[in-house]
Image (cartoon, rainbow, N blue to C red):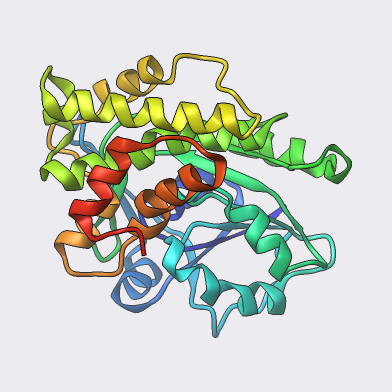
Amino acid sequence: MKYLIVGAGGTGGVVGYYMTKAGKNVTLIARGAHLKQMQTKGLTLEKMWDQSTETIPVKASDMEHYTEQPDVILVCVKGYSLEDTIPFIQKVAKKDTVVIPILNIYGTGAKMQKKLPELLVTDGCIYVSANIKEPGVLLQHGKILKVVFGVREKEEYRPVLKEIEKDLCDSSIYGILSENIRRDALEKFSYVSPIGAAGLYYHATAGDFQKEGEPRETFKAMICEIAALADAMGVPFEKDMVDVNLRILANLAPEATTSMQRDVYAGKSSEIDGLVYEVVRMGKEYGVSVPVYEKVAEKLGGTK
């Protein structure tokens, strides 16, 4: 199968690296110096936990010069860039192309499906901690690498989804075709939203959350508020997400930060609206009290 990965940063770049290394047919969409480096020198992955480094050749293009028709499109851009991908997907997709967004922001697949009614757009999420260290070089902060995806309605299921799951697993990526993607994506959101929000609030790294103290307690409280939202939305969590998320956190390098923190500190666009303010809006929509999120949102700039 032919894969197209839109976005070659800490999510798409890492997935593309492992899938290419496993011999899958993958093209990465990127731009600027990062694209040029991948095209001329290959893609380098550094692992923070053992300081290993490996460079492999990859197929990479920009949107303007990509001319193939992929079977699967993995959308791995930041939430604020999502709109820019729609015309490109419409241009390159076949009628049976499957689109799998694996963004941090909850509900992305349903929003994309409205814009791409002729295609199957699943929902999905990824567990990974990585960033672009410099053009052509990715830094992976921890061993966790899991992609969860699935259809929102059972009648949308296609056998090709099992093939995608197998291709991910063949590539040293823990691929899971979910039977309840609304809940599973919200479980992921219960990690990425609190850690990003609390990380910004306290200017904290993973190490600040790995030890007892106020940042860790705030992180736990925010997870509980997401769990209350899950109950109200009819997709209650089936496991203790505080425990699950603390175990994810424990496996990160102490100096690790979130992509939202790095974007905000660099003065770039960030996913703060979808990861922080959106939870306050969801609380109002579902009648759920989210006082910790409200406190954090107020300090970070409001609920826009």
**Residue 229 sits above or below residue 19 on the image:** above
The quarter of the picture where residue 232 lies is top right
Q: Is 171 on the left or on the right of 2, as rendered?
A: left
286 or 161, nearer to the observer: 286
Q: Is residue 192 left or right of residue 142?
A: right
On screen, residue 286 versus residue 118, left or right, reads left
Residue 172 visible somewhere in the drawing: no
Name which quarter of the figure residue 51 lies in. top left
Question: Is 92 placed above or below 52 here?
Answer: below
Question: Is the residue 206 above or below the residue 63 in the image?
Answer: above
Residue drawn 57% across and 26% down? 231
Looking at the image, can residue 198 be seen? yes
Q: Residue furthest bottom?
A: 64
Q: Residue at x 54, y 79 (%)?
A: 63
In the rendered image, residue 215, in percent from the top left (x then y), is placed at: 15, 30
Identified at 63% across, 79% down, the residue is 87
Q: Position of residue 290 (x, y in %)?
A: 37, 37
Quarter of the image for residue 115 reads bottom right
Residue 41, given in percent of the width and then of the height, sits at 32, 66
**Residue 149 at what x, y percent from top left?**
63, 40
**Which of these two is toward me, 95 or 153?**
153
Q: Is residue 7 left or right of residue 154?
A: left
Q: Residue at x 65, y 79 (%)?
A: 67
